[in-house]
Image (cartoon, rainbow, N blue to C red):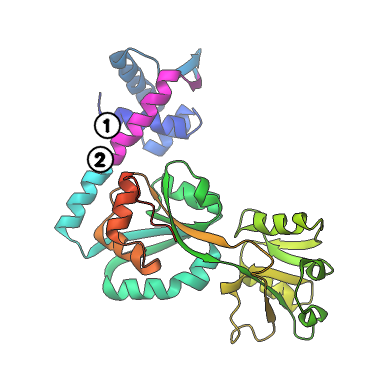
Amino acid sequence: MNLQQMRYVLEVARCGLNVSEAAVALHTSQPGVSRQIRVLEEELGVAVFVRQGKRLTGVTVPGREILKIAARMLQDVDNLRGVGREYSNELSGSLSIATTHTQARYVLPQVIQQFMRRYPGVRVSLHQGSPTQICAYVLGGEADIAIATEAIGEQEGLVMLPCYQWNRCVIAPPRHPLLKARPLTLEEVAKYPIITYDHAFAGRSQINRAFAARGLSPNVVLTAIDADIIKTYVALGLGVGIVAAMAYQEKADRGLRALDASHLFESATTRIGVVKNAYLRGYAYAFIELFAPQLTRRAVEAALSGDEGSDPGL
């Protein structure tokens, strides 16, 4: 058996058992992929995939275990390459970060600025998406680090490290009647059309739960994937907005006013996600610590290795 065969079975599984699609992704031929999988199965003495004629229709029970082991083997190979890269040149390379718009727009700029000053030879790339997409980028090897809230804490295969907690504010145009509410209540907010995040983003489920707990059915008239869009439509007078508090900047958002809503909703936790047992280059640990100072290299390494009592907490 060889690593090429491991890559073939994993890619076929990733492509939903479509051998043709896997062959294209692997830059090889469909017969070549099928032949190598057959050779592997003959050597192992078990079938990895269930077949109906020439079609693959499922993964066998032993096949599931084989896929897990193959994934670990290829991860270890990547780790070996990472060791070589780090010790040949510790100050250059690339760092890919998958994150949401809110993190990229309002939290990461200062962190990346500090990082690039310290590591000018490292190329940084940002991939934006929903929390689920962000996790998929990292699990698929397209990004090194995931930074998101809520859904990232439920992804098998990732080590989730808590970074910080945050809450929300309610925004409205100047002179909006809601700005006079003292105290601000969910009942008052529910009187007006609401503009907030899409269901996949920024703790939307926590917003829904808060209203439901009070027996309220908010009139959500518009949802968006980032706070800048929400603020644009609130400024047009189409509704009041519920956004992450970090997304409201008094100087920049002169056409809006904000009310603290931390007493209305549960706090949310932003986490960094890294593939279990991944090998991270030295500058990746430095980036994580710049983003969350409590996540030192020692703390992250302990979490990645699964050491008991290694949860850094908040």
Q: Residue 19 at x, y = what percent?
A: 45, 27
Q: Residue 188 at x, y = what percent?
A: 81, 71
The amino acid sitting under disc 2 is: Val
Residue with the mark numbered 2: 77
The amino acid sitting under disc 1 is: Leu
Q: Is residue 198 visible?
A: no
- Asked which secondary structure carries label 1, the reply is helix
Question: Compared to 33, does 125 lie above or below?
Answer: below
Residue 151 part of the magenta segment: no
Local crowd at mark 1 within 10 Å, few (<14), some, or many (≥20)?
few
Q: Write down the quadrant of residue 193 in the picture.
A: bottom right
Instruction: Kindly check if marks 1 and 2 are in contact, taking CB atoms under 8 A apart as contact.
Output: yes
- Please name the residue shown 31% across and 27% down the image: 5
Question: Compared to 160, does 55 lie above or below?
Answer: above
- Of the 4 image quadrants, the one containing the N terminus is top left
Q: Which residues are magenta?
A: 56-77
Separation (CA) of disc 1 from disc 2: 9 Å
Numbered circle sitting on residue 3:
1
Question: Compared to 233, does 33 lie above or below?
Answer: above
- Please name the residue shown 61% across and 84% down the image: 250
- Please name the residue shown 52% across and 64% down the image: 165
